[in-house]
Amino acid sequence: MRPGRARGAGALLLGVLPAVCASAQVPLPPREAHALLERHLLENIVPFWYPGAVDRENGGYRLNHDAQGRWRGEADKALVTQARTLWFFSRLHRSPYGQPEHLEAARHGFRFLKDRMWDAEHGGFFWSVSSDGGEAVESYKAQYGQGFGLYALAEYARASGDREAGALAAELFRLLESRAHDPVHGGYLEVLARDWSPPDGDLPGFARGRAGIKTMNTHLHLMEPFTVYYELTGHELVRQRLHELLLIQSSAVVRKRLGACTDRHQLDWTPLTGPEDDRVSYGHDVENVWLLIEAAGALEVPARPLEDLLVALFEYSMEHGWDEDEGGFYDSGPFGEPADRKAKVWWVQAEGMTSALFMFRLTGERRYYDVFARTLGWITRRQADWEHGDWHDVVGERPPAHKSGPWKSPYHNGRAVLECLEILSALR
């Protein structure tokens, strides 16, 4: 059973798409871009995920669908995408497009997260559980996942006013502070055992090899929830940690001579080097750009002092990872060289589109709006699946593989469209 179908896709294809397809070089004016993004949200994204992704039998969300959106059957439920989907329905409810049923879908996801994925003995969330939540499959505490748990709880508490969600978010923040924060070098220990102790031996799956390092990606997705949690609570310690994360994401992970970020670091933030590490993920760099702007806004400090850095990060990704012919960003590449992994991945396009519009709003420079519009053009022509709903996980290098799973949910593209709609509403 598919989560949903793209309602009205035929009308969209007959109406807006020819204008977008006519030339990858012609950007849309803000009013037309706003209308197109509304169609992405209401005719492509939301109908795919609601109501079909809501698991009425076992709780939480069904996130195991093939490239055509067909459900592949019961599967373990991963913290990252369960939390991301809860976040999306909560954020959607707070938007002008929210409906009562979206809050109900968020409440449904919150109950599963709280009742089935929370570790009642040691606190924090399991990395994954069985499809019915009856047992933990991977029980370690990876801060990447805890961050998305906090993100979901904070957004749901903001959307619903649910005090239980707020209390659970406070407990999770307390655990991160007392068990995972590094007071010497700053940031957080990436992976700990179920009881929040240092792991004894290698861990499976995502956690393998992460016990002794710190990554840009994890700290990016801690800065993101801390931004929302600080907006929700205004607590002084949260403000301090958000400020610390802003410094990490604007300095410690940045290779200054390169003008780009790298992912893996020793515990004291010395970057790891070698062929595997001397690479740039364009999606993470452009995502970092707009999340730094958001964090500065939450802290009520100007983003302008960061402008040189933000421009450098964005321009590096443009120089090495931008598809000048078709629009959109490639996946990654080695230092100072063109992209060698040229797949167009759904989340990279979402972050590139959002980041470009944030940079346009910050600087007023038209070239950033053009990147936004041309990325939206690529997404509309190629990344969005107007027949089966939502966006293809990848275009190029391999066929699309899935619409949902342990890593794919309505978070990246749903968040991008909602953020861009909000900005464009003020520009029209």
Image: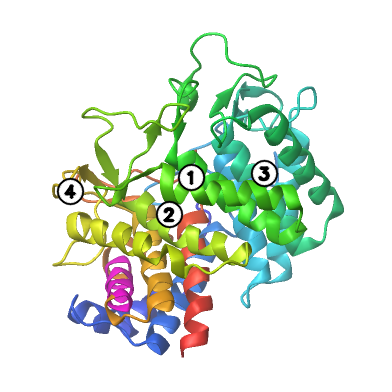
Q: Compared with residue 29, is residue 398 higher up or lower down, i.e. above or below?
A: above
Q: Secondary structure at mark 2?
A: helix
Which residue lies under the disc numbered 3? 60
Where residue 105 appears, as percent x and y from the top left, is: 69, 57
* Mark closest to the chain's N terminus, 2 or 4: 2
* Mark closest to the chain's N terminus, 1 or 2: 1
Which residue lies under the disc numbered 4? 339
Where residue 400 appears, as percent x and y from the top left, is: 30, 47
Q: Secondary structure at mark 1?
A: helix
* Mark closest to the chain's N terminus, 4 or 1: 1
Say what amino acid the circle numbered 2 marks: Asn
Within 10 Å of the Cα at label 2, are there few (<14), some (14-19), or many (20+) other Cα atoms? many
How far apart are the two marked residues, 1 and 2, measured between alpha carbons? 11 Å
Say what amino acid the circle numbered 4 marks: Ala
Q: Give the number of the mark in front: 4 or 1.
A: 1
Q: Secondary structure at mark 4?
A: loop
Q: Secondary structure at mark 3?
A: loop
Which residue lies under the disc numbered 1? 248
How far apart are the two marked residues, 3 and 2, measured between alpha carbons? 29 Å
Q: Give the number of the mark in front: 2 or 4.
A: 2
Residue drawn at x 65%, y 17% as measured from the top left: 197
- Magenta segment boundaries in residue numbering: 368-379
Which residue lies under the disc numbered 2? 288
Between residue 316 and residue 421, name the one nearer to us.
316
Residue drawn at x 49%, y 39% as measured from the top left: 218
Between residue 277 and residue 194, name the one nearer to us.
277
Q: Compared with residue 300, is residue 126 higher up or lower down, i.e. above or below?
A: above
Q: Give the number of the mark in front: 1 or 2.
A: 1
Q: Is residue 72 left or right of residue 199?
A: left
